Image (spheres, rainbow, N blue to C red):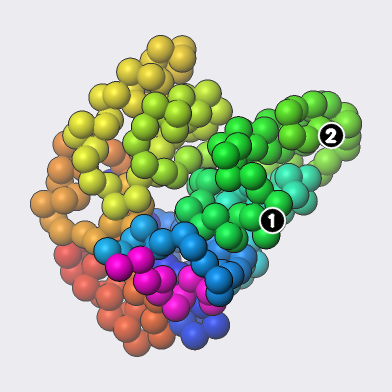
Amino acid sequence: MRICVTIFLTDRTITPVRLARDLEQRGFDGLYLPEHTHIPIERATPYPGSPDGVLPDEYGRTLDPFVALAQAAAVTERLTLGTGITLVTQHDPIDLAKQIATLDHLSGGRFTLGLGYGWNVEEAADHGVDWRTRRELGRDRMGLMRALWAAEPTAYKGEFGSVRASHAYPKPVSGPRTLIGGAAGPKLFAHIAEYADGWMPIGGRGLGESLPVLRGVWEEAGRDPAALQVVPYAVLPSPGKLAHYASLGIGEVVLQLPPAGESEVLTTLDDFARMLDK
């Protein structure tokens, strides 16, 4: 099983360069980074990650994932790089397509695009996103970007955006692999089967019940059963939990690191390594 990590890198934490080097030296397989452009102070949206809805400080201090991953790519050779997740609706898709293609090209095809639709209504609204249609907008963004990544100049006209047939280089080396994050549900699973390579469930709970449903939707869409990838994300590990994932046929897990300085992060990595015999 591939063991990767994720962390909220901020202006107060370990740096991307130090973390990436230590991950590769310790034998970990990949680094995924989250994204928030800003967190409006006047916020009506409760944070779903805690019972009281209070948002941890690191959300408003998050580094840009593409800049941070570019630094990580420059000092590693084997470590895979990913977003968990890119808020795809909050980007101009032509600019985002260029960023993704460039990072994948410069890293030698090591990039995975984890994408999602977000939870913070106010953040999305400042980007001009209509919350009611965010999933359809994300689907449209992906169609436009894939037109730009195509081998030959390809036009795209969607409900929310369009692009003329264009010269757009570099091309991604690896596709890139695309995983959609979010809670299990019919609409999410339909979109995964339509235009992604798999699912990135946060926390990894309830996979025993959800996976058969997703596999059914995937196969009904005519997708190769062997091609579906499920990558539990932001997992707090234990040997029993990882063994359970392995029994479900899961080949990659992303563990959660604390949003902390060098000492605490590297100590946590050492704890993970002992647990996993890295």
Residue name at image x 55 percent, y 82 percent: 11
| Residue on which disc 1 sits | 127
Crowding at dot 1, Cα within 10 Å, few <14 / some 14-19 / many 20+, comes out as few
Instruction: Using the image, determine if residue 178 lies above or below residue 213.
Output: below
- Is mark 2 in CB contact (under 8 Å) with mark 1? no
Relative to residue 217, is residue 106 drawn left or right?
right
Instruction: Using the image, determine if residue 218 lies above or below residue 71.
Output: above
Could one spot residue 48 in this view of the protein?
Answer: yes
Residue name at image x 31 percent, y 41 percent: 251
- The amino acid marked with disc number 1 is His
| Residue on which disc 2 sits | 163
Could one spot residue 69 in this view of the protein?
Answer: no
* Label 1 SS: loop
Task: Please check the rendered image and state whether residue 29 is part of the magenta-colored stretch, yes or no.
Answer: no
Instruction: Using the image, determine if residue 124 lies above or below residue 266.
Output: above
Looking at the picture, tell me which residue is in the foreground, 167 or 134: 134
Task: Please check the rendered image and state whether residue 60 is part of the magenta-colored stretch, yes or no.
Answer: yes
- Which is more foreground, mark 2 or mark 1? 1
Q: Quadrant of residue 47?
A: bottom left
Looking at the picture, tell me which residue is in the foreground, 35 or 276: 35
- The amino acid marked with disc number 2 is Val
Q: Position of residue 191 (x, y in %)?
A: 50, 28
Magenta range: 52-61
Relative to residue 253, is residue 60 drawn left or right?
right
Residue name at image x 54 percent, y 55 percent: 121
Q: Which mark is residue 34?
A: none
- Cα distance, mark 2 to mark 1? 20 Å
* Label 2 SS: strand
Looking at the picture, tell me which residue is in the foreground, 30 or 162: 162
Give the total number of marks visible in the rendering: 2
